[in-house]
Amino acid sequence: MLFAHHLFVCTNQKSGVGHDVAKALKHALKDQNIKNVRGADGKKLRNAVQECDCLDQCKHCKKGSGAALVVYPDGITYGDVHPKDCAAIVREHLGEGRIVASLLLSN
Ligand code: FES
């Protein structure tokens, strides 16, 4: 199955916050019922979350208390993300196509 969005979450922090963020994103996808969606052509697409090592955004992981994550295919990077931010990222970015400006690192 192809991806609608694929989120990669840095889990390279000592605090383990990246693991918590990835878990919260997966819960939000399920809670908001957008783990699987339909593309414009009607094909089934998946929104997925993947844990990964360093994304080269370390100042937003190692000095802040949150994690960095990148959303593909959009190429949007969020920083200092905490589990409490995940429902908004899923609802606004993945669900409504709006960037969560307060967490944005780049575009
Ligand atoms: S440690 Fe998270 S981006 Fe480098």
Image (cartoon, rainbow, N blue to C red):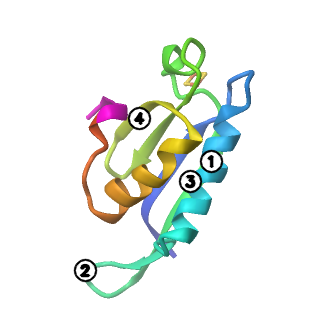
Which residue corresponds to mark 4?
78
Circle 1: element type: helix
Neighbours of disc 4 within 10 Å: few (<14), some (14-19), many (20+) = many
Q: Which mark is residue 46?
A: none
Residue type indicated by callout 2: Ala
- Residue positioned most to the bottom: 42
**Which one is closest to the eye, mark 2 or mark 4?**
4
Q: Is residue 20 magenta?
A: no
The amino acid on which the numbered mark 1 sits, given as a three-letter code, is: Ala
Quarter holding the C terminus is: top left
Dot 2 and dot 4 residues touching (CB under 8 Å) = no
Q: Is residue 33 above or below residue 85?
A: below
Identify which residue, 13 or 89, lies in the foreground. Answer: 89
Determine the secondary structure under disc 3: helix
Report the amino acid beneath label 3. Leu
Residue designated by label 3: 25
Amino acid type at circle 4 is: Tyr
From the image, tell me which residue sits under label 2.
40
Q: Quadrant of residue 53?
A: top right
